[in-house]
Image (tube, helix red, strand yellow):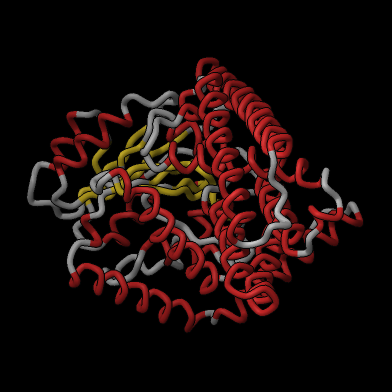
Amino acid sequence: MRSADLVRVGAALSVAIASYAHGALGFALFFLVLGGCVLSRVLGVGRWVDLATCSVLLAAAWAAQLDWYVAVPWLDLVAHGLATPLVAVLAAQLLGRSGSLPDPARSGAGWPLALVVTGLGALGAVLWEAGEWFGHAVVDERIQVGYDDTMSDLLLGVLGSLVAGMLLARQAVRAAHTVGAHAVSGQGAPSVSVVIPVRDDAAALDVCLQRLSQQSLAPTEVVVVDNASSDDSAGVARRHGARVVTEPVVGIGAAAAAGYDAATGDIILRCDADTLPGPRWVELLVRELDDADLDVVTGLGYFHDVPRGLRAPLAVGYLGAYYVLTHLALGHTAIWGSNMALRRRSWLAVRDQVHREDPEVHDDMDLAFALGPRSRIRLVGVWVGVSARALHGRAQRKRRLDRARRTLTLNWQVSPPWLRWRDHYRSRTIQISSWVSRKPVR
């Protein structure tokens, strides 16, 4: 659990406390704060950015409720100088990764990212000031307004956003150069297999493989698992130079497991035939997994075949609910099969524990159950496009829910959630004790 998760718990409690003490306005304010804290987690920003965002937003909200800005006028300047750039960073990542705007962070181009963050910060600063003027006129005249206050708040908000944008730009360029150097020299670069299960989806597979051929870090191999297709899926795979593995047992679990078994890379990336990976998808997942203690990294996605204005809210709602609810069921972070990377040795350790021959389980959730609470799984801010067709129609949605129930039932018979949470915290306690005593975990 991140330190920021504790602040998120505090934000959730603050919603109830502020609702009781300050009514509807208190509820609205802290509900927005909680939304920002959750969004920070869903976007998978860095740990320190996540902690800073949650802490600053929560502290700024309580300062407003407790009239600290009235008692200490300069505190308002601090809040604007810190909160505005942090919110601008979240907005830039949300818009970029959802496809509503180009994502300059993925291309390694630093200055567009700095401009995007600065522009969003300026917009946020203006909206904040407009809200303060409205609040002063309608809600509470103690809210500080005036020419000097407004100009100072705007200046600090824009300058803070400019600094935040420049820091993110520098980080993006440095990361791109580092990974690019490894890709060119081959030094320290692990072998990478991309596994794609497919059944009767030749057209979508063709687009996916085209994108994989344009990666900044080329995978060592692409393994396409033909799951009893009646169309030309296997032919499309071969024309793109992929290795085709045949799995006659119909079911995504059987197909995915066959692909993992056949993969030869140190790192196995998984996506679906209808996944649209960005040009740095392989590079970013490999970089995120480049931590010896991690077993799996799993990313996020947006529905590319829905209107642009709906991409961000649908992505946050659908995947946010999936990750939060499944986390509670697992006792640790879930895995999303359309965008993930795992170490081959981690798969070999649990390959006999997955329900590969049951076509009515969610294979990604089942794999997460098999890996267990002692594994290291991390949600990261790497996005892909996916199709929303799996959610079209009541029958499709019901089937997905039925599969979720079956996956939970099968795995909870082995280890119920309360035991999984116990094991999760026991392993974390051992790690903390080892760190404090400087003794290795045996």
Whether residue 442 is visible, yes or no, is no
State the image coordinates of residue 190 (x, y, percent, origin top left): 53, 32
Q: Tell me where residue 319 sits by quadrant.
A: bottom left
State the image coordinates of residue 51 (x, y, percent, origin top left): 70, 50
Query: On the rendered structure, is 187 left or right of 94?
Result: right
Residue lying at 48% horizontally and 32% vertically, measured from the top left: 191
Q: Tell me where residue 393 sits by quadrant.
A: bottom left
State the image coordinates of residue 355 (x, y, percent, origin top left): 37, 69
Instruction: From this view, report whether residue 133 is shown above or below residue 109.
Output: below
Which residue is at the front of the view, 82 or 193? 82
Instruction: From this view, report whether residue 124 is shown above or below residue 227.
Output: above
Residue lying at 16% horizontally and 47% vertically, measured from the top left: 201
Which residue is at the front of the view, 337 or 253? 337
Whether residue 395 is visible, yes or no, is yes
Query: On the rendered structure, is 212 left or right of 136?
Result: left
State the image coordinates of residue 388 (x, y, percent, origin top left): 25, 54
Count the numbered circles shown: 0
Q: Tell me where residue 407 sits by quadrant.
A: bottom left
Query: On the rendered structure, is 103 left or right of 391?
Result: right
Kindly give the residue lying farthest to the right in the view shown: 437
Rendered-image quadrant of the N terminus: bottom right
Which residue is at the front of the view, 185 or 258? 185
Rendered-image quadrant of the C terminus: bottom right
Residue lying at 39% horizontally and 54% vertically, measured from the top left: 313
Residue lying at 24% horizontally and 72% vertically, measured from the top left: 399
Query: On the rendered structure, is 299 left or right of 144?
Result: left
